[in-house]
């Protein structure tokens, strides 16, 4: 059996991650997905059951459960795209699964909820409290995760927010969490965090799962302290915007510029949208859910970016490389890309194929700010 063939009691499926290539070490599912699907197969779920899958990174759960026409609740555009590709890969219609963005509540009441544990406690808390309005005492609520990423705090949240909880024995380095809905519990949704941008009147708002929950991260702060002169830019794009710190600061400094906020995560875009409104900026503004810049159309004069180098629990630079290629495609001929990065990450080899000039603008012991101009891929 190949690394692209998932064999289950529910059927055999060909599955690949969204950005798979022949040398990729990534797989479209993990052992926790296999345990979740074994649980469904062993429980004889009625064919009319309403099924919700949560945090299904590449669509493995939803594709395998397509017979129930499940709903997939997820925070990432990349997961939505991977699901669509894997449905097509298995000759399944695109409407076999309904995708629901994480900033929107699920639809109706479900008889089974299968949840892949997320990386952050904040997202799990948001999801569990939201789910309470969409389950009943007989709903099968089962979460799965790899043991090395499953903290005791995650398991405790199920008991605090859903009801009685137990865990399975570990198999294949994965474990399941079983929870029974208790209507007597009455938790409330966590309020978004808020904090200032130092030295400005600006405030930022963060919903669950958004980078740098409690305060401005030091890399972004370093870029704000060494911000480029974008006075001549008619349009500025905050790429991988998170709560919108870079774009909102740019809008405050350059009120004549139109702003674009782009992120893969729906809750990040909600945070940026609400942060923009909170600060009463007058710029024309647009928000785009996109895998890097693949779903973005148009041309801008400046791109600002603090690129992530993690995807879930994996560390790599592939996301940054896609961002840089996208920036080169969508910048005007005189446009500039400015990035802040950890000093140990050498992004120049990723930038140079896409830009004619790549310069070190400044740096300190932890971070560098690079400027790229002369996009080659217009």
Image (cartoon, grey):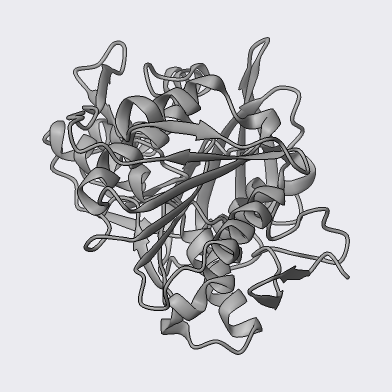
Residue, x 21% and y 27% (percent of image)?
191
User: Which quarter of the rendered picture does the N terminus lie within?
Assistant: bottom right
Examine the image and state in which quarter residue 194 appears.
top left
Q: Is residue 206 visible?
A: yes
Q: Is residue 187 left or right of residue 326?
A: left
Front residue of 235/291: it is 291
Residue 367 in the image, given as x and y percentages of width and height: 63, 19
Res 215 → quadrant = top left
Residue 331, percent across and down? 50, 59
Q: Nearer the viewer, residue 107 or 313?
A: 107
Residue 231 visible here: no
Q: Is residue 26 above or below residue 183?
A: below
Frontmost residue, 322 versus 67: 67
Point out the image quarter for the C terminus.
Answer: bottom right
- Is 138 on the left-hand or right-hand side of 153? left
Residue toward you, 194 or 220: 194
Q: Residue at x 44, y 24 (%)?
A: 212
Please give the count of numbered marks on the rendered protein.
0
Image-quadrant location for residue 53:
bottom left
């Amino acid at each position: 059996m190949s690394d692209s063939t998932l064999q289950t009691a529910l059927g055999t499926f060909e599955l690949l991650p969204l950005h798979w290539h022949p040398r990729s070490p990534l797989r479209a599912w993990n052992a926790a997905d296999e345990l979740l699907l074994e649980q469904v197969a062993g429980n004889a779920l009625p064919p009319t059951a309403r099924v919700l899958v949560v945090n299904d990174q590449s669509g493995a759960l939803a594709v395998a459960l397509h017979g129930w026409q499940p709903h997939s609740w997820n925070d990432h555009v990349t997961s939505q795209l991977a699901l669509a590709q894997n449905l097509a890969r298995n000759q399944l219609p695109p409407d076999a699964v309904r995708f629901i963005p994480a900033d929107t509540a699920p639809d109706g009441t479900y008889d089974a909820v299968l949840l892949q544990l997320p990386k952050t406690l904040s997202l799990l808390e948001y999801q569990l409290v939201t789910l309470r309005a969409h389950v009943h005492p007989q709903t099968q609520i089962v979460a799965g995760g790899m043991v090395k990423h499953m903290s005791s705090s995650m398991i405790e949240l199920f008991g605090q927010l859903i009801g009685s909880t137990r865990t399975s024995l570990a198999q294949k380095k994965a474990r399941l969490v079983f929870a029974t809905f208790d209507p007597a519990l009455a938790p409330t949704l966590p309020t978004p965090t808020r904090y200032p941008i130092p030295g400005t009147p600006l405030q930022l708002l963060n919903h669950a799962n958004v980078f740098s929950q409690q305060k401005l991260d030091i890399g972004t702060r370093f870029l704000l302290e060494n911000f480029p002169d974008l006075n001549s830019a008619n349009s500025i794009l905050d790429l991988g915007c998170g709560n919108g710190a870079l774009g909102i600061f740019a809008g405050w400094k350059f009120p004549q510029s139109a702003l674009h906020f782009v992120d893969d995560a729906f809750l990040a875009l909600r945070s940026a949208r609400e942060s923009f409104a909170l600060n009463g900026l007058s710029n024309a503004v647009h928000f785009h859910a996109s895998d890097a810049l693949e779903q973005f159309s148009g041309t801008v004069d400046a791109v600002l970016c603090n690129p992530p180098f993690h995807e879930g629990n994996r560390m790599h630079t592939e996301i940054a490389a896609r961002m840089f290629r996208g920036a080169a495609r969508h910048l005007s001929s005189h446009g500039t890309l400015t990035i802040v990065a950890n000093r140990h990450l050498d992004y120049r080899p990723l930038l140079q194929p896409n830009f004619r000039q790549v310069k070190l603008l400044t740096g300190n012991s932890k971070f560098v700010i690079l400027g790229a101009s002369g996009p080659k891929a217009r």
